[in-house]
Image (tube, helix red, strand yellow):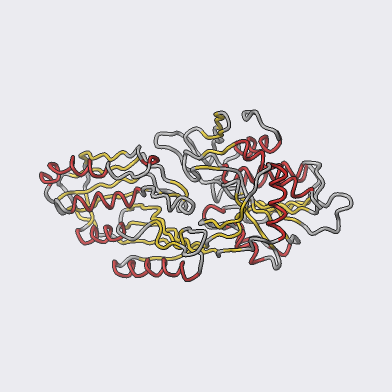
Amino acid sequence: MIITGVRNERPFYYFEEISKIPRPSKKEDQIASYIESFARKRGLFCYRDSANNVFVVKEASCGRENEDTVMLQAHTDMVAEKNSGKIHNFDTDPIELIQNGNILMANDTTLGADDGFGVAIMLAILESDISNPRLECLFTSSEEIGLVGAGAFDYSRVKAKQMINLDSAEENTVIIGCCGGVRTEMTLPLKKEANENTAYKLTISGLSGGHSGEDIDKNRLNAHKLMGEALGLIKEITDYKISYISGGDKDNAIPRECECIIVPVNSDAFEKAKDKITSEILSKPAKKEDKGLIFNVEKTDTSSAFSLADTEKMLKLLSIPNAVLRYRDVAPILPSISRNLARIRTEESKIMVGFSSRAYTKEGLDYSTNELERIANEIGADYYHHERYPSWQDEANSPLVLKYQKAYYEATGKKTEPTLIHAGLECGLITSAVKGLSAISVGANVHDLHTPKETMEIDSMDRIYDTVCNFLKTQ
């Protein structure tokens, strides 16, 4: 094993095993086959559906047949992000694990602890000989792109009354509620014009990025919004036409990079002002995570550019309010509504822009999508919303919460408190589909999710494994 110094070897063995299996969203066939084979070899009931969800059942230990069934649940896909210059194919290459003391990370890519730690813990428990009630383990697919697998599963198979979702990133909390979400695709048609004038390529890189829900209130810079600020500064000096703009990759990640090619009307004025503009942009980071910001301006060639009118439309898209739109007015004080300007792509005759909105209420999601629709209509862009999923909230003093708190205290000697999270969890979809199902979400300490800086505290995963085992052993 690569990972050393652990108390429970088997969950870490399985973490290493699944790290060898490529599993970006929508491409979970290999990991689903691995889990299916794992279950068959151990004589466990296993059902795999067309969405690559895998449902494994471990029958109750002797004497515990009359207890309520418990479900453990985690998702098999991971966010596939890498640093610039890193050669890594997420469709074929294993994750290169690196251990630094108690910290586990990957070599210039996302680690996949979100949600690999949950999958690994479930596999280790399924093969263990601990006493357990009837246990249902649901491994869902494509969670990171809108809870797709969870939305496709046939829940008539589920008998559980209590569910532990293993997809939280803070060990000392019990998540009892999450926000809902929706994604928006916007397409702006373009009119390109021939160009023979001097062009400049503007590049933003070196930003921290982060999870578009859990990190959205941490004032980390969004590369697209920062590019919009740079373009606004240039607008004060001279008019220009945009020729190309691209950045971001995943809807659930704050974009770390953006590239834009412009053709200034007055290139001399731009040349004189570019150093000052560069200095102003480089002064923007408010957090140490973004101190690695790079803003580069260089001459380039382009044979065409958008019209001035289309350039103005693109600038309007870049000015759409981003990050936290509204905070909750009751404890815990978290974002109530947020939006992430996630992806921009330029094709020959169009620009495609992707947004991710989150909110704790239907009205909050509607507030965000209605604003996007209004702006799309103003600039003549097409739009559609997809992958909408519900919010969820359980009771802070439910029997499930109290039993988990007791199991955690027995494993660690520490208390854990119920709270909400500004991120999407599959608990909302699953509890709405299974009548009478109570749920919590728990997990190990995982940091900088959805970025190549993702890390996991090894001893924290050890403790969560102990806690879940204690929970299951308790009658």
Residue 251 in the figure: left or right of residue 290 = right
Residue name at image x 43 percent, y 53 percent = 217
The x, y position of residue 240, in whole percent, is 18, 52
Which one is nearer the viewer's eye here, 278 or 266?
A: 278
88 left or right of 163 in image: left
Residue at 80%, 49% (x, y): give it. Answer: 132
Residue under the point 64% across and 38% down: 15
Residue 388 on image: x %, y %:
51, 64
Q: Quadrant of the N terminus?
A: top right
**Position of 300 compared to 426: left or right?**
left
Q: Quadrant of residue 413?
A: top right
Q: Position of residue 171 (x, y in %)?
A: 60, 46
Nearest to the observer: residue 177 or residue 163: 177
**Residue 326 in the figure: left or right of residue 127:** left
Q: Does 153 sit above or below residue 474?
A: below
Residue 165 percent coordinates (x, y): 64, 53
Q: Quadrant of residue 321?
A: bottom left
Q: Nearer the viewer, residue 173 or 436?
A: 173
**Observer-nearest residue: 9 or 150?**
9
Q: How many marks?
A: 0
Which residue is at the far right?
63
Vertical order, 458 against 386 (above or below): above
